[in-house]
Image: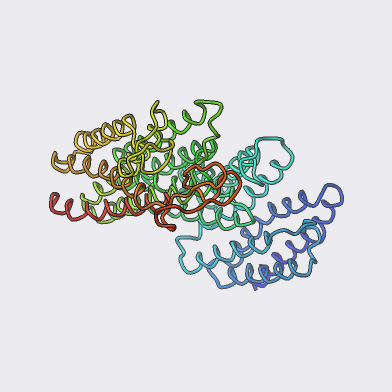
Amino acid sequence: MQVVWGYILIFSYVFMLIFCAGPLLKKKTDVEFSRKTVHIALFVVWVLIDLFMKNTVHQVIVPFVFLVLNWLSYKFHFYKSLEREENDHMGIVYFAAAVLVVMTLSLFFPSLYLPGGAAIFCLTFGDGFAALIGSRVSSRKIREHKSVAGYVACGLACMTALFSFRALYWPQLPVEYVFLLAGLGAVAELTEGGKDNFTVTGMVMVAGWAVQEMASFALTEAFLWGWLVFQVVFLSGAIDYPGSLLSMAIVFVFRYFGGRESLFFLLLTYFTIFILGKLYAGREKEIKQHQGRVLLQIFINGILGLIAMLYFGLTGEKWLQWLAVIAIGGNFIDSLSSDAGRFSAQLPYDFFHKKSVEKGMSGGMTVLGTGCAMVGSLLTGVYSGFVMQAEAVVACLIGVMVFAQTLLDTWMGSILQAKYQCCKCGKITEKKKHCSQETDHVFGKKWMDNNMVNMISSGIIVLISIPLLIILVR
């Protein structure tokens, strides 16, 4: 009988929101206010499920039924108070699907029940207030449909929701994690196209589970540093949103699994390139705006280091930590050489083709860029030895390998990377379009662009380093 009362109350409440409160609000305000007010009020559904259906299959049936109904409404438009005129994405369908996923996982994995509830509270409050405030307060756009005002409102709403959830259901949740989970919820809400329903619930639930199962000072620092790095690189425009998320994950892994010394090494590499990029972007008026890095570039530069550091944390094999340093350091030194070379007074010289090339062209070398690469490689080895306590021979190997990647990348950029000639101005370029028209391929492999060069050169250096490190460490 308890479950029956649960169904009666849940469906009565939701239909009252949609067909009574929703139309009334839409009439007095607008459809967006109506949509988001109903969205916020849906947190009560989880409360009713917890009261009448907890740990039963009915906690899955309820969101499944609403998923079907929401999909039918998306197709046939009978939730008038929840539908935008353009009906541009499946937000109401994604909302029900996200709740269904959370409640299903909570049923099969009871340890996810409270983190899942916290995630749904963040979704209803955070996403709702982000849209309400963001659409009414003028502020800088940080994504196509996201603004600073909405971002801040989401974080504050998530914080309020989590403090309420903590007081009612989860008193064991440490206060500091309320702030961190709220911050992560706001970060996840920046996803576009209605998919923030999945990212908010997913990120808050997983992070909440981690807090529940293994709360520690290291975990707190890892979350905090990842969140802070995201704020810097994304809000400054240095890295796009997906790339900033990956950067946040890399920072988290390096701090949690590799310790502070690994984290500080990573931050030194990140922010040296970040600062050089900003300096170059504002150096001269005639220089075009420096473009932010994208997900693919962050993936190529960081994924091997991420994997190595993750395996180091899981296995304790020290050589994997050094491999992570080589993977990150190699890409860092290569970027350092390239970015520093842009400040050189002389044009880069391509030794393989025996001629000067335009600044930024792959295969070119400058005294300034190469010198910075040598110094950076030396300092990487010194840091590994003195701060990370690598043996002298290992520290030397690390310095040599990160510098070797710069040389290998330069060779591949000169010999193998595709180059094109502009039919209008005659310049050699790496772009398939120049002067607003198609360019002619003149040499190199057509499939070998700069990203491919970076990925292959990094992979080669990592593969060479693995047996050498195993021999030296073991």
Residue nearest the viewer, comparing 159 with 368: 368
Residue 100 vs 242, above or below: the answer is below
Residue nearest the viewer, comparing 26 with 253: 253
- Place residue 271 in its image quadrant: top left
Residue 339 vs 429, above or below: the answer is above
Residue occupying the point 47% across, 60% down: 112
Residue nearest the viewer, comparing 4 with 363: 363
Asked if residue 186 can be seen in this view, the reply is no
Left or right of 151 in this view: 256: left
Residue occupying the point 53% across, 46% down: 422
Of the 4 image quadrants, the one containing the N terminus is bottom right
Residue nearest the viewer, comparing 125 with 148: 148
Left or right of 469 in this view: 437: right
Residue 159: image location, x then y, percent: 57, 42
Q: How is the image coloured?
A: rainbow
Residue 421 vs 358, above or below: the answer is below
- Place residue 148 in its image quadrant: top right
Residue 233: image location, x then y, percent: 49, 38
Residue 187: image location, x then y, percent: 54, 45
